Image (spheres, rainbow, N blue to C red):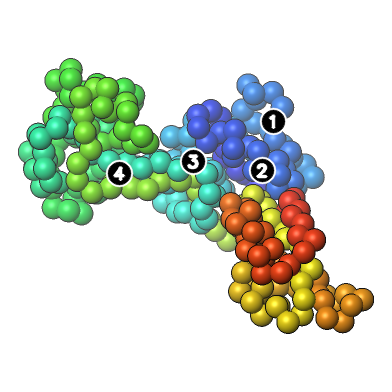
Amino acid sequence: MLRVAIPNKGTLSDTAQQMLSEAGYSGRRDPRALHVIDTRNDVEFFYLRPRDIATYVGSGALDVGITGRDLLLDSETDAVEIDELGFGSSTFRFAAVPGAFNSLSDLNGHRVATSYPGLVRDFLAGHGVTAKLIRLDGAVESAVRLGVADAVADVVSTGSTLRSQGLDVFGPVILESTAVLISAASDREGIETLRRRLAGVKVAREFVLMDYDLPLALLEAASRITPGLESPTISPLRDPEWVAVRAMVPRGDMNHIMDDLYALGARAILVSPIHAARI
């Protein structure tokens, strides 16, 4: 039975569980449950603190898990990323009082507060910078104002939280993180099925099916607008001068694509959602 670690709370939890449900797995119904067995798919789900998942998977106690790339790298375990899941994006940056630091090298000998000491230590070492890391579990942005650190390394979205504490970002991006599927035993039976199913959910979320009718003479131009994954599907119509076309298109671009097709001469343009896929 495949043993899978799932975040039990936090920003990754709900989307991870929804993806698994769309991939055909049966998860927990009680939000307090820490262990669920999906007998139909021969899978055990363990609901754990997101920060602990890489440790459990890296030790071999569990076969595979969903966590953040940031947490994986910070864990310094034997677990490795086997797929990106397309949600939970975040950016890690350094921040300090405006003008205090102009470049990464300015951090040499200074104190940096962070919730990700392993990740930040490796990043600084890779750039030849030595700093004293202060580990905090939360409210890292307050560390400079309270005199605990000279700078911080933390997640930055809009930057409003940092600015409210009188801080500005500086230096290079530490990491662009996202939710990832991790394992230390990639040959374990069932992992490839899980990976393939989750990849199918990503495709279903990112693409739609577009159908339209088109004069045959315009097919080459239309195929450039909707090339599909390999190529569009072309079907004859009763009128030999017209064809029906079907192609997968990015969900975010579908209205622009419909506009372009209509302007070209396509008609009866229809869009359908994709509920599941295997690519």
> Is 5 drawn above or below residue 227 in the view shown?
above
Residue 123: mark? none
Image x and y of residue 16, in percent: 59, 39
How far is mark 3 from mark 4, CA to CA? 18 Å
- At horizontal 79% and vertical 68% (from top left) the residue drawn is 213
The reply, left or right, for residue 162 in relation to residue 252 is left
How busy is the neighbourhood of tag 1: few (under 14 within 10 Å), some, or many (20 plus)?
some
Which residue is the site of mark 4? 119
Q: Where is residue 128 shown, x and y percent of the image?
A: 13, 52
Q: Is mark 2 on a helix, strand or loop?
A: helix
N-terminal of the pair, mark 3 or mark 2, is 2
Residue at screen point 60% across, 43% down:
4
Q: In this view, does 243 lie above or below 91?
A: below
SS type, badge 4:
helix
* Residue contact at pointers 3 and 4, CB within 8 angstroms: no
Give the amino acid type for the residue marked by disc 3 in the picture. Answer: Gly
Q: Distance between the residues labelled 1 and 4?
A: 32 Å
Q: Is residue 211 left or right of residue 185?
A: right
Find the distance from the CA under tag 2 to the CA under tag 1.
Answer: 11 Å
Question: Residue, x 64% and y 23% (percent of image)?
Answer: 31
Which SS class for mark 1? loop
Residue 86 visible in the picture = yes
Relative depth, front residue between 34 and 181: 181
The answer to whether the residues at label 2 and label 1 have Cβ atoms under 8 Å apart is no
Residue 188 or 75: which is nearer the viewer? 75
Residue 28 is labelled as 1
User: Dot 2 surroundings within 10 Å: few (below 14), some, or many (20 or more)?
Assistant: some
The residue carrying mark 3 is 88
The alpha-carbon separation of the residues under discs 3 and 1 comes to: 21 Å
Q: Earlier in the sequence, mark 2 or mark 1?
A: 2
